[in-house]
Image (cartoon, grey):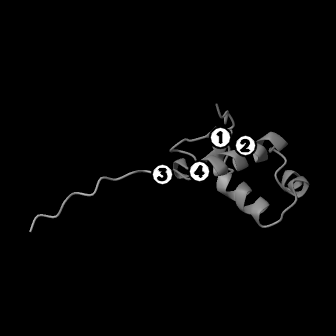
């Protein structure tokens, strides 16, 4: 089971988007910084309230969201 206890959702914080531990730091920001090559050490320096585990769980959450799932659909027969 995936444990993402640092990812929080609150409609009063950042419009309810996924954030880190109830702070105004969206998961999408961290994923974007890592994806664009920002070293995790620099992210932690720029956001001193963050911890290494926050970045790790942000990436896990993003990976979970992008899991490919195959859904089979039954196509209804056309009536002419």
| Marks 1 and 3, how far apart at CA | 26 Å
| Left-right relation of 39 to 16 | right
Q: Secondary structure at mark 1?
A: strand
Discs 4, 2 touching: Cβ within 8 Å: no
Q: Which mark is residue 7?
A: 1
Q: Nearer the viewer, mark 4 or mark 2?
A: 4
Q: Residue 47: image x %, image y %?
A: 81, 52
**What residue do we see at 70% from left, 45% from top?**
60
Q: Residue 24: image x %, image y %?
A: 66, 49
Residue tagged by mark 3? 70
Q: Nearer the viewer, mark 2 or mark 3?
A: 3
* Few, some or many residues within 10 Å of mark 1 (<14, 14–19, 20+): some
Q: Earlier in the sequence, mark 1 or mark 4?
A: 1
Q: Taking the image as drawn, is residue 51 in sight?
A: no
Q: Nearer the viewer, mark 3 or mark 4?
A: 3
| Marks 3 and 4, how far apart at CA | 10 Å
Residue tagged by mark 2? 57
């Amino acid at each position: 089971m995936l444990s993402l206890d640092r990812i929080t959702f609150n409609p009063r914080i950042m419009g309810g988007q996924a954030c880190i531990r109830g702070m105004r730091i969206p998961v999408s920001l961290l994923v974007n910084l890592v994806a664009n090559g920002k070293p995790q050490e620099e992210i932690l320096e720029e956001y001193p309230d963050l911890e290494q585990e926050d970045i790790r769980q942000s990436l896990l959450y993003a990976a979970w969201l992008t899991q490919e799932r195959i859904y089979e659909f039954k196509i209804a027969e056309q009536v002419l």
